[in-house]
């Protein structure tokens, strides 16, 4: 593993305080507040530690209630809602300063056979044919002033955190073009794979990169622009099949609508063989600052 990936795993490996009580540390990933994917991943770890090992995460539905403080640890309280014959359900609350900042329901499912079908993976250039977000950002900094960084800054943040992203910029929607669209490959950095138990958690961590940013594409601008306030409001993931983040995964992100200061975004995650691994949805705040 790379040094940054090892640091990421240490961040997500939260401390057990009691049977249903855990503590995670905060980290500044380059945003003004806690990165939502970090809180989702740490909450998933907390829930998983209260569930039998033969049950894997099936879905999660989370709400971001308040901005997280980068300087404070996070307390995760797990409520054991149900332990059924096939499904297990947990509720997780993340707390700072005695106030909930995040709430999530997680469902776990024992493996079983069933009918199978899936949508086909879209035709996208291979990751080997694309440049990393970090390299593209460096080229933009050295290039002509009329060139646009688009969402490259977020991809640089992701790689510094342990997730390499290679965007297919030719398939990315332009300003004024709807819906907002992105197609990008991502994987863990480093030559050695992370421990098997961490792949689903890392998928949850990476799933929040660039979702709300995709909704911004039709309207132009950049992260941190003074006239637009952006933040994730909720986040959901359905885990269809096991993931491996030591190989490339394709993230197909679409933002079909924005209205009333909010944007709705959907995502599908495929492996290199075209197998649908997970689906995501998110609603984000896109408020005009007057």
Image: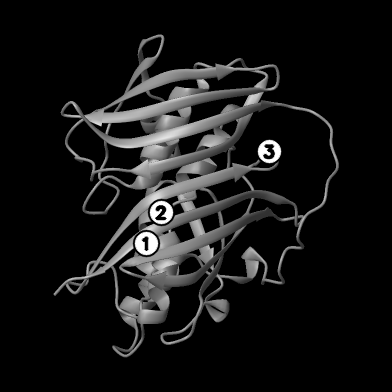
Residue 9 in view: no
Q: Which mark is residue 154?
A: 1
Contact, CB < 8 Å: mark 2 with mark 1? Answer: yes
User: Residue 143, located in which quarter of the rendered image?
Assistant: bottom left
- Residues under labels 2 and 1: Cα distance? 6 Å
Quarter of the picture containing the C terminus is bottom left
Residue at x 71% of width, y 69% of height: 122
Tell me if residue 20 can be seen: yes
* 23 horizontally vs 263: left or right: left
Regarding mark 2 in the picture, which secondary structure is present there?
helix
Q: Nearer the viewer, residue 16 or 239?
A: 239
Dot 3 crowding, Cα within 10 Å, few <14, some 14–19, many 20+:
few
Distance from Cα at disc 1 to Cα at disc 3:
26 Å
User: Does residue 126 appear to the left or right of 167 in the view shown?
Assistant: right
In the picture of the structure, the residue carrying the numbered disc 3 is 242
Question: Which residue sits at x=52%, y=73%?
Answer: 181
**Which residue in the rendered view is the most extreme toward the front?**
260
Residue with the most extreme top position? 18
The answer to which image quadrant residue 93 occupies is: top left
> Which residue in the structure is indicated by mark 2?
158
Q: Is residue 240 above or below residue 274?
A: above
Q: Residue at x 63, y 71 (%)?
A: 129
- State the image coordinates of residue 264 (x, y, percent, origin top left): 45, 63
| 243 in relation to 250, above or below | above
Q: Which mark is residue 21?
A: none
Give the percent coordinates (x, y) of residue 161: 38, 47
Please tell me whether mark 1 or mark 3 is closer to you in this view.
Answer: 3
């Amino acid at each position: 593993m790379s040094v940054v990936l090892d640091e990421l795993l240490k961040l997500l490996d939260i401390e057990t305080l009691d049977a249903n009580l855990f503590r995670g540390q905060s980290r500044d990933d380059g945003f003004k507040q806690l990165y939502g994917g970090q809180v989702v991943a740490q909450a998933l770890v907390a829930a998983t530690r209260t569930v039998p090992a033969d049950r894997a995460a099936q879905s999660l539905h989370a709400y971001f209630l308040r901005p997280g403080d980068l300087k404070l640890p996070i307390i995760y309280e797990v409520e054991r809602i149900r332990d059924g014959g096939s499904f297990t359900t947990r509720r997780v609350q993340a707390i700072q300063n005695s106030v909930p900042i995040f709430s999530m329901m997680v469902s776990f499912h024992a493996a079983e056979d069933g009918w199978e079908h899936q949508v086909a993976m879209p035709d996208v250039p291979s990751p080997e044919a694309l440049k990393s977000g970090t390299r593209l950002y460096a080229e933009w900094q050295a290039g002509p002033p009329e060139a646009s960084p688009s969402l490259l800054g977020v991809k640089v943040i992701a790689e510094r955190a342990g997730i390499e992203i290679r965007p297919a910029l030719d398939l990315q929607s332009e300003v004024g073009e709807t819906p907002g669209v992105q197609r990008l490959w991502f994987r863990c950095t480093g030559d050695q794979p992370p421990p098997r138990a961490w792949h689903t958690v890392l998928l949850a961590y990476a799933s929040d990169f660039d979702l709300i940013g995709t909704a911004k594409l039709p309207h132009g601008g950049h992260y941190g622009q003074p006239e637009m306030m952006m933040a994730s409001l909720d986040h959901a993931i359905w885990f269809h099949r096991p993931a491996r983040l030591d190989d490339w995964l394709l993230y197909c992100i679409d933002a079909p609508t924005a209205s009333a200061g909010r944007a709705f975004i959907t995502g599908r995650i495929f492996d290199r063989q075209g197998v649908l691994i997970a689906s995501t949805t998110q609603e984000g705040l896109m408020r005009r600052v007057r």
